[in-house]
Image (tube, rainbow, N blue to C red):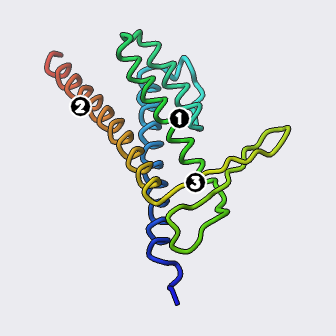
Amino acid sequence: MSEFPSHKDILFFAAIGRMAVAWAHLESALDIKVDIARNLGWGKVDPVRPRSLKRKIEYLRKFFKSLNMPDDGMDGYRTLFRAINELAEKRHDIIHGAVVEHAEDAEEIKLIRFLYSDESLGKKPVTVTTDSVMDTARRIESLSHSIFQWIEAISRYARERAQSDDMQSP
């Protein structure tokens, strides 16, 4: 008689938990980026603080575009935002997917994610493994780490600038 949940099941559900925590870090990093943009005066241009992921990305895209950044800099942000949107879709598939087939100790888990529209209820079949969920979690962690490095660099620059301004003023 096998134990429930099995060791493989525990690892699978732990991978989902790790992905959820990683996503919280990514959203926090985006929230801080939005806050920095607002503190740099963008709040006057667009006074509504974004809450949804889609709105945060739109907000930041407009903010960075307003800086008249060189194309290669904007390309970096476009790449970042595409990666975030891709990972958001994977996260939605896993977090909002209903398990429809999961034999004990199975390698693959089949989910159905319902897609809502006014006309119909769509179904998106999704197949995941513990490894694929962990890979998604790692990719999310990597992106959030990159964003936090950017935040730290901006913070360091602001501190150095403030210290320099303090030394120059009589």
| Whole-number angstrom distance, CA of label 1 to CA of label 2 | 28 Å
Residue at far bottom of view? 1
Give neighbour class at mark 2: few <14, some 14-19, many 20+ (Cα, 10 Å).
few
Q: Quadrant of residue 47?
A: top right
Residue 52 x %, y %: 59, 38
Amino acid tagged 2: Arg
Name the side, left or right, on which 151 lies relative to 8.
Answer: left
Name the side, left or right, on which 46 lies relative to 8.
Answer: right
Which residue is nearer to you in this view: 18 or 51? Answer: 18
Residue 155 x %, y %: 28, 32
Q: Which residue is mark 2?
A: 156
Residue at image point 38% right, 41% down = 144
Name the side, left or right, on which 116 lies relative to 12.
Answer: right
Q: Which mark is residue 127?
A: 3
Residue at image point 59% right, 31% down = 55
Q: Secondary structure at mark 3?
A: strand
Q: Which residue is mark 1?
A: 85
N-term mark: 1 or 2: 1
Residue at image point 42% right, 36% down = 32
